[in-house]
Amino acid sequence: MISPPDLLLEPIVRSALAEDLGRAGDITTDAVIPADTTARVAFAVREPGTIAGLDCARLAFSILDPKLDFRIVVPDGSRVGAGDVIATCSGSARSILSAERVALNFVAQLSGVASATAGIVRAISHTKARLTCTRKTVPGLRALQKYAVRTGGGVSHRFGLDDAVLIKDNHIAIAGGVGVAVRRAKQATGHLVKIECEVETLEQLDEALDAGVDAVLLDNMSIQTLRQAMKLIKNRAVAEASGRITPQTAPEIAETGVDLISAGWLTQSAPALDIGLDFVA
Amino acid sequence: MISPPDLLLEPIVRSALAEDLGRAGDITTDAVIPADTTARVAFAVREPGTIAGLDCARLAFSILDPKLDFRIVVPDGSRVGAGDVIATCSGSARSILSAERVALNFVAQLSGVASATAGIVRAISHTKARLTCTRKTVPGLRALQKYAVRTGGGVSHRFGLDDAVLIKDNHIAIAGGVGVAVRRAKQATGHLVKIECEVETLEQLDEALDAGVDAVLLDNMSIQTLRQAMKLIKNRAVAEASGRITPQTAPEIAETGVDLISAGWLTQSAPALDIGLDFVA
Amino acid sequence: MISPPDLLLEPIVRSALAEDLGRAGDITTDAVIPADTTARVAFAVREPGTIAGLDCARLAFSILDPKLDFRIVVPDGSRVGAGDVIATCSGSARSILSAERVALNFVAQLSGVASATAGIVRAISHTKARLTCTRKTVPGLRALQKYAVRTGGGVSHRFGLDDAVLIKDNHIAIAGGVGVAVRRAKQATGHLVKIECEVETLEQLDEALDAGVDAVLLDNMSIQTLRQAMKLIKNRAVAEASGRITPQTAPEIAETGVDLISAGWLTQSAPALDIGLDFVA
Amino acid sequence: MISPPDLLLEPIVRSALAEDLGRAGDITTDAVIPADTTARVAFAVREPGTIAGLDCARLAFSILDPKLDFRIVVPDGSRVGAGDVIATCSGSARSILSAERVALNFVAQLSGVASATAGIVRAISHTKARLTCTRKTVPGLRALQKYAVRTGGGVSHRFGLDDAVLIKDNHIAIAGGVGVAVRRAKQATGHLVKIECEVETLEQLDEALDAGVDAVLLDNMSIQTLRQAMKLIKNRAVAEASGRITPQTAPEIAETGVDLISAGWLTQSAPALDIGLDFVA
Amino acid sequence: MISPPDLLLEPIVRSALAEDLGRAGDITTDAVIPADTTARVAFAVREPGTIAGLDCARLAFSILDPKLDFRIVVPDGSRVGAGDVIATCSGSARSILSAERVALNFVAQLSGVASATAGIVRAISHTKARLTCTRKTVPGLRALQKYAVRTGGGVSHRFGLDDAVLIKDNHIAIAGGVGVAVRRAKQATGHLVKIECEVETLEQLDEALDAGVDAVLLDNMSIQTLRQAMKLIKNRAVAEASGRITPQTAPEIAETGVDLISAGWLTQSAPALDIGLDFVA
Amino acid sequence: MISPPDLLLEPIVRSALAEDLGRAGDITTDAVIPADTTARVAFAVREPGTIAGLDCARLAFSILDPKLDFRIVVPDGSRVGAGDVIATCSGSARSILSAERVALNFVAQLSGVASATAGIVRAISHTKARLTCTRKTVPGLRALQKYAVRTGGGVSHRFGLDDAVLIKDNHIAIAGGVGVAVRRAKQATGHLVKIECEVETLEQLDEALDAGVDAVLLDNMSIQTLRQAMKLIKNRAVAEASGRITPQTAPEIAETGVDLISAGWLTQSAPALDIGLDFVA
C-alpha cells in the first residue's frame, strides 16, 4: 500500500487544480470570504468503505497554499464507517474552500475503487484467490487507480502495454494460433518480462502451457470449464479468471482454485465513496 | 452536443496513450503481429445506452497512426442497443491493437455518463425540469464528462470555480449569512457572471431572493419544502434541486416544478458502458 | 483586487525567466559579479501611476533564488508618484541582477494597464458607468491583464470564449438576425451563462431586448443614439458602450447613462509604466 | 525579415488559443452558427502601418482547423494604408469565428511594434544609425517582438542574458569599475561572445575602450556629450545610444554619428495596429 | 528491432530541435542561404558500424519542415562500412541545414550504442549467452538507447524501477539478507513481475535460488566462481553476469554458460559512430 | 565554472527521475526496505578524473525527497583520485535508493566530459591554445555538457544555431563562395553577433579575412597548412582548429599557434567516469 511518489502525483493534482480554478481562480470565495479568515475542516466519510488517495488531498492543499496544515487521521487502506473523520486541514479559509473540491474528488474516486476492491476481496477471502484489475481504467488516473486497488487488498496487474506480455484473442487470431503467438513473444522479450496468454478453450490452454507461458487468462469460462482448466494447469502457470466479475459471482469462481480474479469493473465503474468536508467550529 | 475542439482533446488523448504505451510501447503486439498485417475492426456496444466520446477514439487512432481509417457509424448522442456497431477502423493491425484500449476507455467512460444522464432525463421528461451535473468530476476529465452529460440530454452547469458564482453553505457560514454573501459577490463580479446561492431553509431562500440572486440551489430539501420553495420563488430565480438524485427519486423532485436537478452521481459514479472491439473478417 | 493564485502565475513567470536566461543563464552577471556579493535593491517608479503585478515580481525572484527577501512596500492598486519605492529585494547580487528584468517587465506592463484604467475610471467617476476591458489582450497574459484592469478600478468582462455568450455582428449576419441568434444561444447554454448581444441600430437593440438578453453591447453609436438606446433599454438589460474609448471621449459616453464602457486599448495599447530598480547602499 | 520557424511559434499560438477557448470552447459560435456554414473573411487594416505576425495568424487558423484556407495577401514587412487587405481566410464559419480574435491579437500587437519601428527608422534614414530594441519586452513574446522590430526595419540586439555580454551600471558599481568588469567578462566568455558596456561618462567610455569592448552603450547622454563620445570612440567600438528615444528625439541623436539607437518603448509601449476582420459576401 | 512509436519519439526530437534553434532559429542559414534554394543530401557513415536511430532523423526533418523528403536507404540494424549511404533527404536547403545537426546527433549516438553492442554480440556468438544493458543510461534517452541495444543484437533488460524487481547489494544489506529481501518482493508484487537478485557469493546464490527468484545477477565474480555458480543454478533461474564487461572479457565469461551478460558501458560510454552529411550535386 | 541555474536544471532532472520511476515507482525498494529505515551514503569515484554535475545529483535527491540531506564534499571542477568521496547523502533509505541511479547517471556522464576535457587541456597547457567543444552533443543535455567542458578547463563555443554565426562548408558551397556568405551574414546580423567561417584552403582563409570575419575555423588542415594559415591570419581573427582532435594529436596542433582547438569527441564520445554509491555504516 505504498503510494506512488509525490513526483508522479504532483502533475496530476496540479492539473486538476488548474482545471477547477480556470483562468480567474475561485471568484466566489475571493468575493465572499475575507482574506484573513482562518478555518478548520474535517474530511468525514458518509458511508462505510476503504480509504485511498489522501496523499492527493494533501498535495491539493499544499500546492494551492503551502501554509495549510493538512493531517491524515486514518491512513489509506483503513476501513471506515459513516461519520469517521479521515483527515483534517486548518489554515486560510479561502485556500481551504478553493482546494476542497479537487481534494475530495481524488479521495472519493480512489476510495470508491478501494472500497469496491475490498468488498470482493472479503467475498473471496476463504479461498487462495487474489483480486486484480485490468487496463480498463479512467484515462490519466491509471497509476492512482491501481494504487487504490492495492489499497483495497487487491494485487497489481501490468501497468500498461510495455511491462508484461498479455496475448489476447485478437493477437491469437491474427498470429494464427496460441503456440505461434507465445513463441514469438518469448523470442522477442527480455528475461524480466513475463508472458500471459488469454485462452477460451481447453485446447488453447493446453497449447499455451506447452509453449511455456507464465500465466493464463481464462476468459469467460463456465465454472465447470474453470475446474477442468485448473486440473490441466497443475501449477504449471498462474491461473487468472476474468469475465463479468461481481461480488456475487466472485466466490464461486474463486473456489475453482484459480490464483487470480481480474475485474475491469473496479477501475471503470466502481461508484465514488461519499465523503464530505465539514467546517469545525 | 458539440464536442470540445480537437485542440482541447488532443493533450488528454495523447497523455492517455503515453500512459498506456509506457517507455517501450506495446511489446505484445510488436512481438506477435507482423508489421504488414492489416485489419478491420468494429466498435460494438454490448448493452443499451447512449454514445459519447467518439472524437476521443478517433484521435487515439489518428495520433498513434495517421494512416488509420476511423469512421463513425452512429454519432455521439445516439441511443443504441446491444450489438450495434458505432464505429469502424481499418489499417495496420499493430496500430489498431496498440490504440484499442485507450480508445475504448474514453468511449466506455463517456458513454457511461451519457447513458446515466439519458436515463434520468427520460424519467423526468414529463416535467419542465432539466438535468445538470456538478463539479464532482473525475480529475482531468471534467470538460469531457460535462460534454457527455450534454450528449445524454443534460445541460451545462459551471465548468469550474471561475465562470460563475456559487455560494455554498460554508461560504454562508463564514461570511455570516446569505444576504451579506450575495451582496459581496454582486459587488465583486462583472456583468456577465451569474450568481447562484445554496439555501437549506425557506428563510435563507427568502434572503437570497431579496438579495437578487440569479439562481438558488435547493439542497437536500424534502418534497414538501421544495413545493413551498417554488411558491416563494415565483420565477424570480432559477430553481435547482440537488441531493442524492437517482432515477427513482428524480421524477418526484422534478414534479415540484424546479427548473433544474443536479446530480453529482452522473460524473462521479455512473458505470462505464460495455463496449467491445470486434475484428471483422 | 485579488491576484490570480500563484498556481496560475508560476508557469507564466517561469517561462518568462527561461525566455531571458536562455541556455546558459546570465553570462554577464556570472562573469562580473562575485558569487558571495549581496545587494539590496528598491523598485522605484519614475512617473505617476497605479501599481499592478508585484506578485509576479515576487515569484520571479523566488523562483530564481528562494533565499531572496522580496518585500512589497506599496501593494497592487496603490496610486504612486515619481520616486516612490514600491518594493525592495535583498540577497545575492547575482540572483537579483539575473531576475531583475523579468520582474520589471511584469510590473511595468501590468502597471501600465492599471494606470491607463485608473485614468479613465477617474474621468468617468462622476457617472455610474464602470470601465471594463475586452478580449483584445496580449497573447499569454490575459488573466494578468484583466487582473490589472481590476486593480486600476475597472471591472471584469468575460475571460474567454467559454464563460459567457457574446453575440457579435458577424454571428448576427450569419445567423440571420439578432432574434434568431439570441434564441439559439439561450437554448444552448446553461442557467449560469449570461448572454450579451452586440447591436448597431435601435432596431437591433429592440430585437435583442425582446429576445431577453442579459446585456447589450452598443457598438460605435453616436452620443445621441446612445441616449435613445438608454431610453429604450429602461433597465431591462445591462448597457455596455464600446468603440474608440479614450480618456477624452469616455466622460461624454458615460454621461449617457450606460452601465459599462469597454476599451480594448487598455490591454492592447496602454504604455508600460516606467519603473526602475535602484541599488541601495 | 525571416520569421522564427513554426516549431518555435506553434507552442505560443497553441497557448493563446487555449487561453481563449478555455474549457468549453466558443460557446457563442457553437450555439449560434450552424456547423455547415462556410465563410470567407478578409483581414483589413484600419490605419496606416507596417505588417508583422501573419505567420501567427496562419497558425492560429490551421491549429484550430487544418482545413481552413488562409492566404497572405501582403507579406510581413509591407507598409500598408487604411483599408488594405493583408490576408484572407475561407472555410468553416465556426472555425474562423473561434480563431479570429487570437489571430488578430498576434497581428495587431506585432504590427504595432513593426509600425513604431518603421516610424523611427524613417525618421533617422538620413543618417547611418540603425534602430534596435532592448530586453524590455512583453513576457513570453520576446522572440516575436524582436522579429517585429526587424520586420519594421530595425536590427537585432541580444535575445536574452546568455547570448552576449552587456555590462550595466549596477554590474559596474558592484564590480568596482568599468575596467575590472570588462576584463572579467573577457576572461569568462568564449570567442563568439561579444562584449558591450554601458557608460555614463566620458571617463567610463575611455576605460571601456581601453579594456577592449566590442560595443559601448551611451546611456542618457546629452547631444553634446554624445558628439564628444563619438570623437573618442573613432570606430574602435560600436556606439549605441539609449535613453527616452522617440520619433522626435531620434533624428538629433542619430545625427551625432552613433551606429545604433535602442528604444525599449518599441516592445514595451508601442500601441497595437488597428486591424479588423471583415466577412466577405 | 521495432522502434518506439513516433508518439514517444516526437517530444524528444522536438526538444532537441528547440535546444539547437534557441530563440531566433538558425541565423547563419537564414542569412546565407536564399529561401528558394533546394538541395539533396546523403547521410554517409565514415567508419564501419551498425545503424540505429533513423526514425529520429526522419522526425527531426519532418518536424522542422513537413515538405522535406527523407528516405531511409539502409534500415536500422544494418551493418555498414565506411562510405555507405544510409539515408537521403531532399527539399529546402535552409530546412536541411537547420535540422542536420540534430538529426546527425541522434543517429551518431544511437548507432554508437548499436555498434558497440554488435561488437560484443559477435564476440560471444559462439555461446548461448545474450548481451543486455543496464539502467546506466544517458538521462532522457533511455528508451532510445535500449532500442539501440536491441538493434545491435542485444536484448532488453528492465526499463526502469517499476517494471521488474532487481534486488541489489544495498537492498540486501538493509533488508538483512537475500532470503528476507526476496520473500518481501514476492509478497509485494503481482503475478506479471519477475524478480531478480544480485548475489556476490555462492552462499547468497543458494539463498536466492531457495527463495525462488526468476533470475540472479552474478556480480563481479571470477570465471571460476561463475562456473561454480552455473553448476549450482542448474536452470533454476536465469543467470546474468555483470561487472566490467568489454569485448575482450566477454567471451570467457560467456563460455561459463551464463544466459546473459550485462554491460553498463554500452549505454554510458560507447563512442558515437562517425556519420556525416554530404551535399549531392 | 558556474552551473546553469536550478531553474534550467530542474526540468531535466525531473524528467530523468520520471523516466526511471515509470508509472509505479521503485517497486523493489518499496517492497524490500522498511519505510522508516534511514541510511547514509557516500559518492565515491572509482578512477581518477574531474568532477562535474553535482548540482544535478543534489536536485535528483531533493526533488524526490526534500528531507534528504545532500552535501557536496568536493566541488565541481575538482580533480579527484580513485576512492575519493565527492558527496554524501543521508535520510530515508528508500528515497536514497530510488534516486541513486539518476543522480549517478548525471554525475558519471558529466564528469566523463569534464575529465576528457581536462586531459586534453593538460596536454596543451604549454601553449596558448584553449580547448572548446561543438554542437555534436547528446540531445537534451547540451547546456549541461557545455558546462562540463568549462568545468574541465575548456571554454564555451556557441550554444546553438541562434547565438553566433558559423558558416560551414555547405553554406559556402550553396552561397557560392566564402566572400558572399560572410557579407550576407554581416548584413543580416546585429552588432552583438560574432561571425566565424570554416575554411579548408588558404585561399578561402584569405577571402574570409578580407571579408572581416571574427574567427576562422581551420578544418582538417595539416600541421604545415595550419602554420601557414597562422602566418596569414596575423591576429586578424581568432583561429580555431578542428578535425579528429585527440589527446595525442592536440599538442602538435596547439603548437601551431592556434587560439582554439575544438573537439566534438568531448561531448559525443567521452566515456563516463566510474562513480559508485557506498552505504556508510
Image (cartoon, coloured by chain):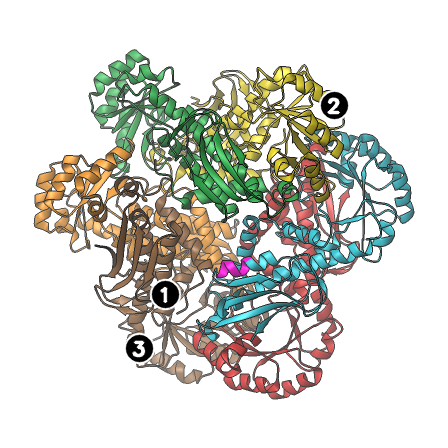
Chain colours: A green, B yellow, C cyan, D red, E orange, F brown
Residue under label 2, please give it.
B232
Determine the CA span between mark 2 and mark 1: 75 Å
**If you read the primary sequence from the N terminus, does the residue marked by circle 3 or circle 1 appear first?**
3
Residue at the spot 17% in from the left edge and 39% down from the top edge = E179
The chain holding disc 1 is F
Q: Position of residue F81 (x, y in %)?
A: 23, 67
The quadrant of the picture occupied by the N terminus of chain A is top left
Q: Nearer the viewer, mark 2 or mark 3?
A: 2
Q: Secondary structure at mark 2?
A: helix
Residue under label 3, please give it.
F124
Q: Nearer the viewer, residue B200 or F94?
A: B200
Badges 3 and 1: C-beta atoms under 8 Å apart?
no
Q: Is residue E183 left or right of residue F98?
A: left
Amino acid type, residue under disc 3 in the picture: Ile
Q: Nearer the viewer, mark 2 or mark 1?
A: 2
Report if residue F175 is visible in the image: no
Magenta residues (range) = C59-65
The chain holding disc 2 is B
Q: Residues within 10 Å of mark 3 (few under 14, many from 20)?
A: many
Q: Position of residue C273 (x, y in %)?
A: 69, 64
The quadrant of the picture occupied by the C terminus of chain A is top right
Q: Which mark is residue F148?
A: 1
Determine the CA span between mark 2 and mark 3: 93 Å
* Residue at mark 3 shares a chain with residue at mark 1: yes
The chain holding disc 3 is F
Q: Is residue B259 above or below residue A186?
A: above
Report if residue C218 is visible in the image: yes
**Quick one: which residue is furthest to the top in this view?**
A224
Task: Give the main secondary structure, helix, strand or loop, of the magenta stretch.
Answer: helix
Q: Position of residue B30 (x, y in %)?
A: 35, 36
Q: Residues within 10 Å of mark 2 (few under 14, many from 20)?
A: some
Q: Nearer the viewer, residue F131 or D210?
A: D210
